[in-house]
């Protein structure tokens, strides 16, 4: 173990006041809660009429020992190990004979009955550490009747009172279905979801942010700041930095607010490809007039999906070869750089669909901007460097915020199980305040879901929360971005700090402020 | 300014005991010093017979105010701003009327007389900060008679008593020539070099390491650790991580010792391309047997230059098209992936030479390994992700080590100027001990130089120091690497910490230990 790994083991996460004495609190139904969409009723007869619950004062009698399973699902997010540790500690506090079983390698491990009992010593070595390696993870979705039955068998076999699914929108959708299925089959196993994703798109009125977003954004912002300082020192390059994050641009927005790049695109603005290219080219021309031949441009990974004409093009190419494209799309395709054309045509997912996330957006934009500058007879120099920030930030050491948040979420999940809830997701509010003031809830997952028609079939899904162009963080950004274009107002947030003043160790995402 | 930027402004670098009272020390000639190569004599008649000097006790009388210029040269290295601040503070301590002039944008600013006087307030805002943006930098070499004359005119115009060149091997070679030239022309301006480069290849018996190496390696190691934790959590990808650093593999070696990847190539081992590809393929097959389909592989940027057959191929291609290659090289070229062939043929420097650093080594290896695995009928999955770590680490906040080291080097440069030295480079020893125990020297730059024949012409250059395969760091690495192949012994160093225990804030490069 590195020195920092060892030091972080002894960090004691700050927790909400309501988690200080677990015997003095109880999750209690809120009568005035919202209702789920009526369309969901037929899919969820057993769990449809649940209400949100709030953690409030209450007296808890002695509880029997609980046998709980937990699994990670999907991509890593820092703070995940702390969910496990918080869950473990709370279960032991509730009843010292309680047991926690780790389900290995994601939902696949649930289907295939791969699990291990977690002991104090082992789980303790993951305290405040990054990654999901204590259990591993996976992207398997539990969809077929067979998979549901196998999952049920695993829970039966392990004699689980509850199952905690730590995952994003798809995984929590799965959690809702499992909860319903288990009830229908008369299985005692309750299912509780914990909101995880660095993308920041799993939000609701009750879920302000998922854990992992803060650490990932801070790590990306450290790197962006370093690159910006490199840019302004060398004065040679335009850095095109693509940021991980599926469709929504929350990460790009947060990192832009933290680092003040010259440009940052927010997919949700739905600019056309032309408009984006022209905006960059104009920036380069204007900066050249100010003798600046360098800059920093942030590009969300999902940008391409929001560009209307690219969306159409990709939808068409999913079903027909480029030579059969209608004229406008044919023209657009022909104007794309050859490498990108190749990438679009070759890299398909197992269903034959184009893998939008594989498209080298930064390379695409660099090529198109070069063309555009040529068209404008640009007299300056345009040298570009492309970057993709992704794997650097998903498994980093959790920031104090994510360490506290993950740990508290794990404890809350334990309370949900103790108090008999199923089909709910853990939620905390007032996250911009110090942890002791956080307000704890459990929300029926159905309240986040709606019915969609996909390929002619009805599907119940949790809608991804996109960047709201009327929200305060976006308004703040759009009020400042014009100044960042030509003046260099780069901020260098530097590496995440774990020791010293809380002013520097305990910051929360700017988006929450 | 970000919170960390502000906080770091108040960090007081630790300095050697000998710098605590500048009036009580003096640089004194060492009689038993080494001699430069005799071949250099004709190029350096004035400066040839200089001896190394050691900072020792001595009594200094009142000094007149000094007018000093300073410039950055070449790529960024963290700690550079502290060299300026240390120089500034020491000059003011030596004589409060002394002045420091910043030469802008590197050697070009010296030739073109672009300078500004640095004031306490401005320079203070760069204290303990990354980048070179206080002055900017550049890669211009002072080579022609005209450039030497212009540089002399700038020094005359600014009436400089001394000039500090903060740079790597080429820039310090330049410093030696300028010192000689100024003496020949009867100009009073002394020239002092400061060893800068993240690459770690500017070393000698007296120069243990240049500043910037530590911060860059720590930043890269943070990222490599994060990626390794991602790899072991997701268990999906082999990450091929290319690390900046010209020919020598010091960065790769330091990062390997800090993170324990499954494989790390050290260019100086001069493995053939085939051997490298087979080594990776064998690793993948053996790990597959252990059910591990992920891993982390470090690749130094200069690797390709060390591969004997690639070296020959590139030398041939510099002068003739691929169709005229001799058979073995033709075969090698034909076996390269198409994209790499294109890259080699198209990207040339202004002299028409292939830009080896532009070759996508990580993509090349990934492609060749795919082929090799196919040849071996590999039954597992091989998914690879390529990364290039470079701009992320050159301009980061300096680690305490680099902040201390840079600041002390700046102070030492001031003493060299006060004590009448020219053509010397600042050097410190015992860097693995706490700063108070560092030993300070100034070494004639000629002692680092030798005569080379390049394109039929004699050239005096500082030889780059490569990784010594008999040195302790390499021996340590080669004793451990076999264990790292199949067992996952990843270390996660995490982000650089500036506050808290010195055990975590004041570490030195592993290479120095």
Image: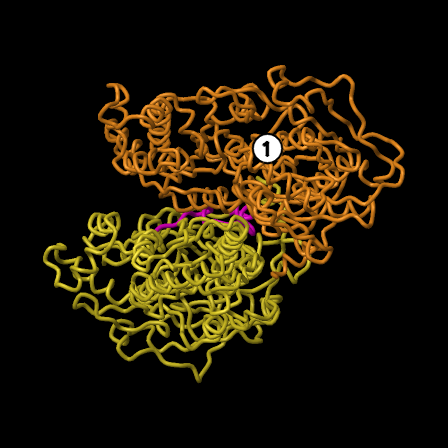
Chain colours: A orange, B yellow
Percent from the top left, x then y, of residue A225?
50, 42
Location of the N terminus of chain B (image quadrant): top right
* Residue toward you, A166 or A276: A166
Can you identify the residue that label 1 sits on? Answer: A174
**A154 relative position to A309: left or right:** right
Residue A364 position (above or below residue A128): above
Q: Residues within 10 Å of mark 1 (few under 14, many from 20)?
A: many
Residue B131 magenta-highlighted: yes
- Disc 1 is placed on an element classified as helix
**Frontmost residue, A84 versus B170:** A84
Residue plotted at (65% across, 47% down): A81
Q: Magenta stretch: residue A431 in it? A: no
Q: For the image shown, how many numbered marks are present on the structure? A: 1
Identify the image quadrant of the C terminus of chain B. bottom right
The x, y position of residue B404, in whole percent, is 57, 60
Farthest residue toward the top? A38
In magenta, the rendered stretch is B119-138
Q: Residue furthest left?
A: B324
Residue A179 position in % (x across, y down)? 67, 31
Residue A450 pos. (x, y %): 58, 20
In this image, A505 relative to B418: left or right?
A: right
- Is A92 displayed left or right of A237 in the figure? right
Q: Quadrant of residue B177?
A: bottom left
> Numbered disc 1: what chain?
A
Relative to the observer, which residue lies in front, B379 or A451? B379
Relative to B165, is A274 above or below? above
Q: Is residue B262 visible?
A: yes
Confirm whether residue B154 shows in the render.
no
Magenta residues: mostly which secondary structure? loop
- The residue lying at 42 percent from left, 30 percent from top is A486
């Amino acid at each position: 173990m590195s020195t920092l790994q060892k030091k972080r083991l002894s960090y004691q996460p700050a927790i909400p006041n309501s988690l200080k004495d677990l015997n003095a609190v109880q999750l209690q139904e809120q009568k005035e809660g919202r209702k789920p969409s009526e369309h969901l009723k037929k899919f969820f007869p057993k769990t449809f009429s649940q209400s949100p619950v709030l953690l409030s004062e209450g007296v808890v009698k002695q509880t029997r020992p609980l046998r709980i399973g937990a699994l990670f699902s999907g991509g890593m997010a820092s703070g995940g190990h702390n969910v496990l540790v918080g869950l473990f500690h709370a279960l032991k506090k509730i009843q010292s004979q309680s047991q926690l079983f780790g389900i290995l390698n994601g939902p696949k491990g649930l289907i295939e009955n791969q699990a291990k009992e977690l002991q104090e010593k082992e789980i303790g070595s993951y305290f405040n550490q990054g990654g999901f390696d204590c259990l591993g993870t996976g992207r398997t979705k539990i969809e077929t009747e067979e998979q549901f039955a196998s999952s049920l068998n695993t829970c039966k076999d392990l004699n689980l009172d509850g199952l905690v699914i730590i995952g994003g929108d798809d995984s929590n959708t799965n959690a809702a279905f499992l909860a319903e299925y288990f009830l229908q089959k008369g299985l005692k196993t309750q299912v509780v979801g914990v909101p995880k994703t660095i993308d920041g798109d799993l939000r609701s009125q009750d879920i302000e942010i998922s854990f992992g977003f803060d650490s990932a954004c801070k790590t990306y912002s450290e790197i962006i700041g370093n690159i910006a300082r490199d840019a302004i020192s060398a004065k040679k390059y335009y850095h095109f930095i693509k940021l991980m994050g599926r469709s929504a641009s929350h990460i790009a927005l947060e990192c832009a607010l933290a680092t003040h790049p010259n440009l940052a695109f927010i997919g949700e603005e739905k600019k056309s490809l032309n408009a984006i290219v022209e905006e960059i080219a104009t920036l380069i021309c204007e900066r050249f007039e100010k003798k600046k031949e360098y800059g920093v441009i942030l590009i969300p990974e999902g940008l391409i999906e929001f560009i209307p004409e690219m969306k159409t093009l990709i939808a068409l190419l999913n079903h027909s070869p480029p030579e059969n494209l209608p004229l406008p799309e044919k023209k657009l395709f022909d104007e794309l750089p050859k490498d990108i054309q190749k990438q679009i045509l070759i890299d398909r997912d197992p269903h034959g669909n184009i893998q939008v996330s594989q498209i080298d957006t930064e390379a695409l934009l660099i090529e198109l901007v070069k063309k555009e500058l040529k068209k404008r007879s640009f007299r300056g120099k345009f040298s570009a460097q492309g970057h993709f920030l992704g794997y650097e930030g998903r498994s980093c050491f959790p920031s104090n915020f994510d360490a506290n948040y993950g740990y508290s979420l794990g404890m809350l999940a334990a309370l949900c199980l103790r108090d008999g809830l199923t089909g709910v997701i853990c939620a905390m509010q007032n996250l911009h305040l110090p942890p002791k003031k956080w307000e704890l809830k459990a929300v029926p997952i159905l309240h986040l879901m709606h019915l969609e028609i996909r390929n002619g079939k009805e599907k119940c899904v949790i809608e991804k929360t996109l960047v709201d162009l009327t929200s305060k963080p976006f308004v703040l950004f759009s009020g400042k971005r014009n100044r960042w274009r030509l003046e260099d107002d780069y901020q260098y947030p530097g590496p995440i700090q774990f020791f010293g003043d809380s002013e520097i160790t305990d910051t929360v995402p700017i988006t929450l402020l």
